[in-house]
Image: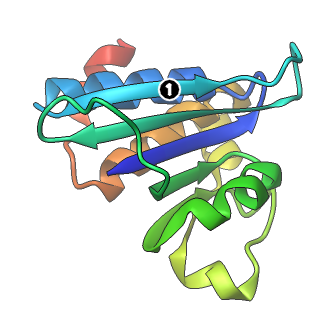
Amino acid sequence: MNILVGGAAGQGMDTIAYLLGKTLTREGYGVLTTKDYMSRVRGGHNFSLLCVEAETPWSTATTTEILVALNEETYLLHREKLVTTGRIVFDPDVFALPASDEERGIAIQLGTLARAAGGRIMANTVATGAVLALLGLDLAEAARLLS
């Protein structure tokens, strides 16, 4: 399974990738993470790709099962990599999915929930929890990593 997490520089993709990778590893999965950075300090498109398998993966795939799109640019750049049964985690307050992808979308008000939990900067943590819940994993391990 491949999980792609993308957004603008400074939105916390590294945190999401770290928390997902560490949690999945502690759950017994093999995880390979790659990162792609645009050459801007803030605002450029960045993404991390996590390849998750029962054993340690040795390479990444060209398809994605879960796309975490923190901004519309991520969705537009990576939607073609999403498998037919893939899911898109996104914030409907940031952008809307076209009708053709609404069924695959998991709309979560990341910013709103983050502000309620202590600050907009926590949106990456909310996104991490959403992916772990989507995978049916216990959130306790991720909570331990955050404490």
Q: Which residue is mark 1?
A: 34
Residue 30 in picture, x, y percent from top left: 20, 30
Residue 69 in picture, x, y percent from top left: 65, 50
Disc 1 marks a residue whose amino acid type is: Thr
Asked whether 117 or 76 is in front, the reply is 76
Is 144 above or below relative to 90?
above
What is the basis of the colouring in this image?
rainbow
| Residue 13 location, quadrant | top right
| Residue 141 location, quadrant | top left
- Residue at left 32%, top 16%? 145
User: Horizontally, is 103 left or right of 85 in the view?
Assistant: right
Is 45 above or below relative to 133?
above
Residue 62 appears in view: yes
User: Horizontally, is 44 left or right of 138 in the view?
Assistant: right
Asked whether 25 or 142 is in front, the reply is 25
- Residue at left 67%, top 55%? 78
Residue 23 in picture, x, y percent from top left: 27, 28
Residue 118 appears in view: no
User: Horizontally, is 64 left or right of 89 in the view?
Assistant: left
| Residue 75 location, quadrant | bottom right
Asked whether 2 or 132 is in front, the reply is 2
- Residue at left 63%, top 81%? 102
Counting every numbered tag in the picture gives 1
Helix, strand or loop at mark 1: strand
Label 1: few (<14), some (14–19) or many (≥20) C-alpha neighbours in 10 Å:
few
Residue 19 in picture, x, y percent from top left: 40, 25
Picture quarter with the C terminus: top left
